[in-house]
Image (cartoon, grey):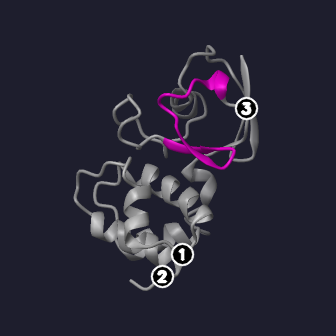
Amino acid sequence: MAVITVNGKRHEVQASPDTPLLYVLRNELDLNGPKFGCGLAQCGACTVHVGGRPVLSCSTPVSAVEAPVTTIEGLGTPEKPRPLQSAFVAEQAAQCGYCINGIVMTAAAFLRENPRPSDAQVRKALDGNLCRCGTHMRILRAVKKAAGVAV
């Protein structure tokens, strides 16, 4: 058994220590934001924050989690979205939406460190997140809008 804090709530989870954090979040805690994309830490769909840093939850064993976890459900709510989430809606940056969890979580951590990014910096920050729908320009505009940078 492991004890983790997710979105401000403490949870005792029954998973074995080597269980990926993603499986605990989805299967034990019923959180649907983080997605299983590749299972190989190559697509970014499973990104969450651990201690404020973006982490690929498909390749992070639950036993390695020593800081609070934030999923997209903990960033904001439909009633009170974060500015980044509002920008993604305004720019219609999601098509199928499968990748957006990882992109938003990666962008949120990136913008905390770099609140006034250039296009090149945003592209580099999101390089590990795959989107097959082709909304890349909308995603870029959404991140820049959230940062308050002219788009």
- Label 2 Cα neighbours within 10 Å, binned few <14 / some 14-19 / many ≥20: some
Q: Amino acid at mark 1?
A: Arg
Q: Which tag, 1 or 3, sits closer to the chain's start?
A: 3
Q: Amino acid at mark 2?
A: Val
Report the residue marked by disc 1: 116
Residue 142 appears at what percent x and percent y? 41, 72
Report the residue marked by disc 2: 149
* Point 36% across, 69% down: residue: 140
Q: Quick check: 142 left or right of 81?
A: left
* Point 44% across, 75% down: residue: 144
Q: Is residue 68 magenta?
A: no
- Label 3 Cα neighbours within 10 Å, binned few <14 / some 14-19 / many ≥20: few
- Label 1 Cα neighbours within 10 Å, binned few <14 / some 14-19 / many ≥20: some
Report the residue marked by disc 3: 66
Residue 10 appears at what percent x and percent y? 77, 36
Q: Range of the magenta residues?
A: 47-64
Q: Are marks 1 and 3 in contact (CB under 8 Å)?
A: no
Q: Which tag, 3 or 2, sits closer to the chain's start?
A: 3
* Point 61% across, 62% down: residue: 113
Quarter of the picture holding the N terminus: top right
Q: Which tag, 1 or 2, sits closer to the chain's start?
A: 1
